[in-house]
Image (cartoon, rainbow, N blue to C red):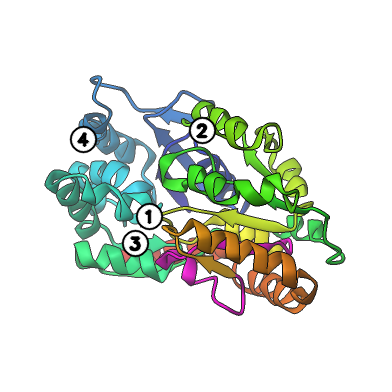
């Protein structure tokens, strides 16, 4: 099966997705505006305004489809490549399967009436919309009627399940990892402010990434509040990062907008205790039996939640094993990519009949 993928080639998720499609026997052509890399088509920039380049690439996409003759056209991110594909009119040549990434439905349509219209335009002109949570798919349905949908988690590679902890002996102080970069949507500043007292008391050891647009301001604030007690990690290979992740006790996320985070599923798969902001997308994985949710506007509540984890951590083994089993059943990357391919093949076969 021949698949034309249109996505941000800088993204780790794009690379992982395309590699797995190829590993499972698909012929994939990746086209992207964002960067120039080997084994991809770099779409031309026609101006300085990024959002206009998507629309301007419609004619080039039409030519690509004519040359490559894909069985499936697979844009990622509704208001960007989804909109470009919709404008190009190539749906008459092959079925369009649109991948939602979360912010394209949860954040972008709120920016302006134009952004909302672009997103809805793309949704209406696709044959199937795939998302990683019922929440994100329902939000998409609020914007436009959808012909077909599929909830498919991205998940963790089966090989990395072997990195999970063999026992639940916990660190003293408790080792907490925040695996989201320093961007406003991930709310790392709030986590720092809320937990600084117990960091300074030596009850937890917390590590943040050393990357993201707000990292310098965060470092300055962390030093002012906690001295040198806050730790950082740099970007690593995937195996190295997941090995590093597995060495921690608690996964912590303060994201104010999310679908079903890959980082959460990775942490559950490896046996970490999940503590996350109480938002709809996360609730599909976390409840009182599978983790700890906190009010994103209440720093005291987060401190109380973390104190409760510290106090009860010795009795959480059953919860951790249940979480690991659920990920193994529902969120193994290779299996979910196979499900994605099955949907694409069904659509392609239906078109050819």
Disc 4, SS = helix
Task: Name the residue beneath numbered marker 4.
Answer: 55
Q: Which mark is residue 129?
A: 3
Q: Is residue 183 left or right of residue 57?
A: right
| Dot in front, 3 or 1 | 1
Q: Quick check: 226 above or below 313?
A: above
Which quadrant is the C terminus positioned in?
bottom left
Task: Give the mark nearer the N terminus: 2 vs 4.
Answer: 4
Residue at 70% from the left image edge and 70% from the top image edge: 324
244 within the magenta span? no
Disc 3, SS = strand
Residue at 36% from the left image edge and 50% from the top image edge: 103
Q: Position of residue 269 (x, y in %)?
A: 69, 63
Q: Which residues are magenta?
A: 270-291
Nearest the viewer among 31 and 165 is 165
Q: Which mark is residue 91?
A: none
* Residue 337 in sight from this viewpoint: no
């Amino acid at each position: 099966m021949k698949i034309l993928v249109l996505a941000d080639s800088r993204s780790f998720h794009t690379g992982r997705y395309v590699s797995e499609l190829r590993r499972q026997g698909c012929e994939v052509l990746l086209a992207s505006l964002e960067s120039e890399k080997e084994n991809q088509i770099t779409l031309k920039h026609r101006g300085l305004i990024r959002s206009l380049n998507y629309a301007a690439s419609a004619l080039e996409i039409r030519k690509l489809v004519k040359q490559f003759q894909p069985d499936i056209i697979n844009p990622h991110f509704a208001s960007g490549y989804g909109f470009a594909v919709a404008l190009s009119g190539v749906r008459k040549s092959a079925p369009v399967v649109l991948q939602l990434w979360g912010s394209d439905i949860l954040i972008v349509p709120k920016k302006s009436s134009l952004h909302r219209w672009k997103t809805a335009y793309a949704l209406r002109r696709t044959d199937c919309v795939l998302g990683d949570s019922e929440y994100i798919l329902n939000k998409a349905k609020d914007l436009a009627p959808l012909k077909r949908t599929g909830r498919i988690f991205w998940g963790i590679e089966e090989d990395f399940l072997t990195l999970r902890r063999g026992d639940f002996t916990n660190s003293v102080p408790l080792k907490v990892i925040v695996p989201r970069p320093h961007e406003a949507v991930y709310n790392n500043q709030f986590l720092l402010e809320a937990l600084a007292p117990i960091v300074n008391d030596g009850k937890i050891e917390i590590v943040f990434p050393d990357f993201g647009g707000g990292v310098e301001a965060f470092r300055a604030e962390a030093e002012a509040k906690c001295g040198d007690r806050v730790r950082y990690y740099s970007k690593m290979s995937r195996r190295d990062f997941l090995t590093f992740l597995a060495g921690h006790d608690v996964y912590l996320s303060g994201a104010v907008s999310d679908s079903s985070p890959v980082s959460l599923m990775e942490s559950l798969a490896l046996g970490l205790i999940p503590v996350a902001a109480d938002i709809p997308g996360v609730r599909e994985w976390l409840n009182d039996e599978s983790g700890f949710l906190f009010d994103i506007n209440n720093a005291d509540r987060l401190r109380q939640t973390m104190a409760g984890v510290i106090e009860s951590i010795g009795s959480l083994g059953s919860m951790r094993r249940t979480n690991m089993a659920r990920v193994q059943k529902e969120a193994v990357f290779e299996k979910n990519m196979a499900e994605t391919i099955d949907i694409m093949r069904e659509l392609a076969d239906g078109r050819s009949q």
